[in-house]
Image (spheres, rainbow, N blue to C red):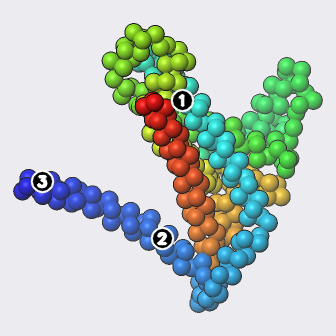
Amino acid sequence: MTNTLNVRRFVILGLLPALVIYTLFVFVPVIWSAYYGFFDWKGIGEAKFIGLKNYVEVIHDPVFWRALKNNVIFVLASVLGQVPLALVLAIVLYKSNPLQRFLRSAIFMPMVMSSVIIGMIWQYIYHPQIGILNFLLDAIGLGSWKLQWLSDAHIAIFSLIPPLLWSFVGLYLIIFISALQNIPGEIHDAALIDGASGARKMVSITLPMIWSTVQVAIILCISGSLKSFDLVYVMTKGGPAHSTELLATYMYNSTFSSYRYGYGSAISTSIIIISLLFIGTSQWLTSRKSKQEAKGGHA
């Protein structure tokens, strides 16, 4: 009993510094931001209490809904693009030979690069005159497909999806490789004895065993997509005509360009609420799938 108490005290003391830092730099600012959402405040001077007016304005602002729509596009692109792509790459590259280690490093490289640098690289790729994308289209006889990739309001948001996938797929690749390597070798041997291989082994054995990791990756995708800012701000600043505006860029522009700190706080609180709703829904759906598979297995 004494040893158990000592272990608990040691764990609490070990976690306490991180908990204090998290509370001071994450939890308190969130509460503070929600508080200032009820005020008309320009960042300096006296804050005037206006109740729910900022939140009502957010709901009635068409730019907010445009930004939310664009964020939904980013979420879907991340969940349906990054996670499956990273999973396929992890299955191909989870063994450890020199070529696979090199390919892993190459895919992970964008994760260690600054988002500003990535944005500038893709700006040059999409440049209408000197960009490599339009040059390649010309070279293969598809010059009629050349577009103003970041200047056309109809396609600009979709042009941001490739750099988004390229930037973060390496993170999920490493996560999935770690999960695959933790599957006991005996399970693979038993699957081979039972005649399960290829796609059947993947669907019936591998994927269920790493499903909790997939759930975590989906949560990271959703939260990361909903707070996307730097890449979009570097490449388009939310333009043209708000066509690439995201919730984070909308909050930044409303706060620091218009000096409406109270309104920006209301937007940031709305982003947190929306993130929780998205993450809660994804958890419910993925947990429901796990329970259905478990019932099917018991049957």
CA–CA distance in space, label 3 to label 1: 40 Å
Say which quarter of the image contains residue 58.
bottom right
Q: Residues within 10 Å of mark 3 (few under 14, many from 20)?
A: few
Left or right for 72, reference 126: left
Q: Indicate the position of residue 209 as horizontal and vertical percent values.
A: 42, 30
Instruction: Nearest to the eye among marks 3 and 1: give it.
Output: 3
SS for dot 3: helix
Which residue is found at the position 52% from the left and 49% from the top? 283
Q: Do the CB atoms of the residues marked 2 and 1 lie less than 8 Å apart?
A: no
Can residue 221 be seen in this snapshot?
yes
Residue 4 got which mark?
3
Q: Indicate the position of residue 200 as horizontal and vertical percent values.
A: 53, 18
Q: Nearer the viewer, residue 143 or 244?
A: 244
CA–CA distance in space, label 2 to label 1: 35 Å
Q: Indicate the position of residue 277 as horizontal and vertical percent values.
A: 58, 58
Three-letter code, disc 3: Thr
| Residue that mark 1 sits on | 87
Say which quarter of the image contains residue 118.
top right
Three-letter code, disc 1: Leu
CA–CA distance in space, label 3 to label 2: 35 Å
Say which quarter of the image contains residue 68.
bottom right
| Residue that mark 2 sits on | 29
Which residue is found at the position 55% from the left and 31% from the top? 86
SS for dot 1: helix
